Image (tube, rainbow, N blue to C red):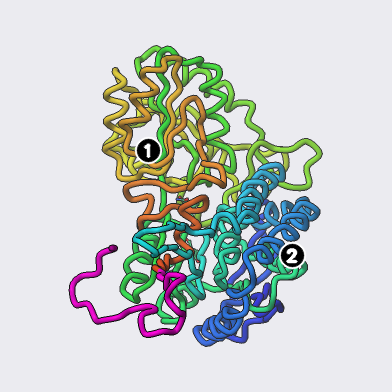
Amino acid sequence: MISSFINNQYVESQSERHLPVYDPATGEVQNQVGLCSKQEVEQAITIAQEALDSWAKITPLNRARVMFKFKTLLEQNRDELANIISREHGKVFSDALGEITRGLEVVEFACGIPHLQKGEHSLNVGTGVDSHSQMMPLGVVAGISPFNFPVMVPMWMFPIAIATGNTFILKPSEKNPSAPLFIADLLKQAGLPDGVFNVVQGDKEAVDTLLQDPRVEAVSFVGSTPIAEYIYSEGAKYGKRVQALGGAKNHMVVMPDADIDGAVNALMGAAYGAAGERCMAISVAVAVGDETGDALARHLQDKLATLKVGPGYGQEIENDMGPLITKEHKQKVCGYIQKGQEEGAALLVDGRELELAQSSDGFFVGGTLFDQVTTDMTVYQEEIFGPVLCIVRVNTYQEALQIINDHEYGNGTAIFTADGDTARDFSANVHIGMVGVNVPIPVPMAFHSFGGWKRSLFGPLHMHGPDGVRFFTRMKTITIRWPESDVKVGSKDSIQTQAEFVMPTMK
Ligand code: NAD
């Protein structure tokens, strides 16, 4: 049974509720995860609250030193962690390593917390009066993460949360719960005191407890849009600070002047990497002009014939793409392919017909390509979260821009072009949070912030980078006046000689 990790110890849930954890590459149940009850989550909150005071008082430099040690341990244990990811998520080993690297970069960013949390200072805001602002920790904060990045997404959250002096409770996805436990153990080895980082395994019951408990100050969420909306409104109802990142439908515009080979290679990786289970995956290629559309369709079809699909681990020659996360998700993705056909899209490559080198009950779907997709089709409108790429053909750049701006999601987008003027116009006018110019997956680095627009993010602040520091701290501004040197400290003239009833202004 996969446990939780509370107060620096592995803790088995006593709730007697559990869920199977699959090996997506074989379809077999490899373990069970124990789901925490409301009382068990409340106990974890109590422990995080008890750890808070002393952790918040530790100097930022010493908190950063724990992060430095954690970074070294992560580097030393990278392969083992990637293996755990690959076995529960299904993604190929090198992709799991890439996910760890992107998480590690946030740890590196958090190592600079003494600088990031300095606040601001103004000398002489008035005569003899100084003012400074301090970025204070919030208290007990929680993170709720999705299955598709079991390491990177929690690491968008907790390194900054704990480096700024909060204590943290992570509720990982119940579909791949082991990697966060491995991380918790590394944090303990790095010297993180008891109760500062806790993992509670669970489902809606655990999430609702974190949302409703008044001792939890903030909730950081990443997952699908319907759940993100729920988290945002429920969190707000209980007075919490919330950032809730949701789903996506990311478009890549290919202009007639683009290098087609470069665009096709970019689309292959961005659409089919991690079996399309990335919130920044490209799921729509917008071809400007029929010649571009024909070239994309032809080249992508050829490339798909060489796409290596199979288990993500244990292979001498690595596959390009692994299985989907569950049987239900495979059925959902296949349902979308069926729907696309019924609604009249041209199915150029059908991933349901995939033949694997070795027969398997794993949750595999091959790379799928639709052409002649229109904006009224379900495969265009909804997030599929699988290896399905739709080509939409338009006549002009303006049409391409318009359909992207009209879509309900606004996470990421890209344009492939040789024309700087078009790229500049696109960057300025597209209503999307993260934009790539000749870069298919424009995931911001750790020292910038990550987040979408429209129904891809609820809440004002993005993840990690400067927004991450703002999200996990609250500002306190202190205005100070000391008696001038010729006034005897403690005398009746020293601070305030008479009551003033007008709005204070600096003299
Ligand atoms: P999900 O919404 O099903 O689950 C996310 C988390 O919410 C999990 O921890 C889960 O246990 C919890 N949860 C599920 N149902 C709940 C409920 N009814 N009440 C309370 N909590 C609940 O998402 P998923 O399938 O794990 O992940 C895939 C989704 O995440 C995709 O939509 C993808 O686009 C999105 N995602 C977005 C980003 C981003 O940065 N915008 C990043 C990664 C993934």
How busy is the neighbourhood of tag 2: few (under 14 within 10 Å), some, or many (20 plus)? some
Q: Is residue 96 above or below residue 173?
A: above
Q: CA distance from mark 1 to mark 2?
A: 45 Å
Q: Is residue 429 above or below residue 6?
A: above
Which marked residue is nearer to the observer: mark 1 or mark 2?
2
**Residue under the point 51% across and 36% down:** 441
Task: Using the rendered view, name the quadrant where residue 155 is placed.
Answer: bottom right
- Magenta span has 492? yes
Examine the residues drawn in magenta and state their main secondary structure. Answer: loop
Q: Is residue 151 above or below residue 97?
A: below
Name which residue type carries label 1: Gly
Nearer to the camera, 446 or 17 = 446
**Residue under the point 59% across and 24% down:** 303
Question: Quarter holding the N terminus?
Answer: bottom right
Q: Mark 2 sits on what residue?
A: 186
Q: Mark 1 sits on what residue?
A: 340
Task: Using the rendered view, name the quadrant where residue 40 is placed.
Answer: bottom right
Q: Which mark is residue 248?
A: none
> Where residue 353 appears, x then y in whole percent?
55, 37
- Magenta span has 377? no
